[in-house]
Amino acid sequence: MKKALQLLLALPLVLAAGCTSIGYDDPNMVETLTIDFGSTDLQTMAADMSDSLLAAPSMGYLDHSGKGEDKRIIMYVGQIENHTTEHIETQGISDSIRVRLMKSGKYRFVVADAGQAEIGDQVSFQQGSGRVDGAMAKAFGKQLGADVVIFGTLRSIDKIKGRSLESLGYKKQDLFYQFVLEAANIETGELLWSEESTIRKRSSTGIFGG
């Protein structure tokens, strides 16, 4: 009878453990499921860099022969190198920065490599398929030339302190991220702007944790 009662009491716990719950949540909420690089870190760093770029006097405009009346800087968004120990899709950071900057209306952009492949395919189709009106067919050699290239590096320093009597059996981890982004004049190689964004995250895991 006692065992039957124990099983009956434990049954709800077993059933709850086997259930799966799925739902929508605020994409801008702070994400702390793990100490690893997450959505909040991406959004924070992208916002820091975008705000700094938009406020930089050296990134206001760039004039040269052939620029025309629109003096806004034409940007090419290059690579963000991942020098962390994690597999981080840094393209997501650069994409978020570009979206924020484009929404400001302060800069103009040329497409990156993936977009160039699509453009090349379309120009080749318009020029060679015979299906497009010749007066409307686009040609190579008329793209805008970027004034500035943006590129950067994401690094991390990861420190772990194992369980000990001093830490009362807790395992502690400190994870530091450094993101440096720079903008350079493509013609002269001069650095026009540079910014750093840093994040520190800490976790403490008890005896029964992972």
Image (cartoon, rainbow, N blue to C red):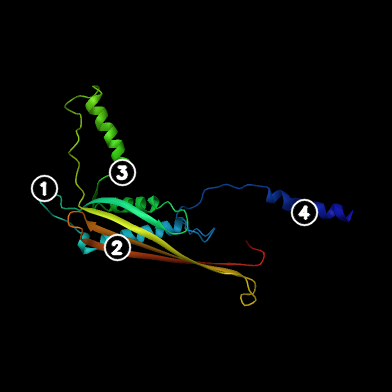
Residue at numbered disc 4:
10
Q: CA distance from mark 3 to mark 1?
A: 24 Å
Q: CA distance from mark 4 to mark 3?
A: 57 Å
Where does the image place residue 86, in percent across and percent down from the top left?
47, 56
* Residue 30 in the image: above or below residue 17: below
Residue kind at label 2, given as amino acid type: Ser
**Mark 2 or 4 closer to N-term?**
4
Where residue 52 is drawn, which disc sits there?
A: 2
Q: Earlier in the sequence, mark 2 or mark 1?
A: 2
Given residues 101 and 197, the one toward you in this image is 197
For discs 2 and 4, the disc positioned in front in the rendered view: 2
Judging from the image, what secondary structure is the residue with disc 2 in? helix
Q: Earlier in the sequence, mark 3 or mark 2?
A: 2
Instruction: Give the residue type that dot 1 points to.
Output: Gly
Q: Looking at the image, is 45 positioned above or below residue 17?
A: below
Q: Residue at x 9, y 50 (%)?
A: 65
- Asked if the residue at tag 4 contacts the one at tag 2, i.e. Cβ–Cβ closer than 8 Å, the answer is no
Tell me the distance, in whole angstroms, between the alpha carbons under discs 2 and 4. Answer: 56 Å
Q: Which residue is mark 3?
A: 113
Name the mark nearer the viewer: 4 or 1.
1
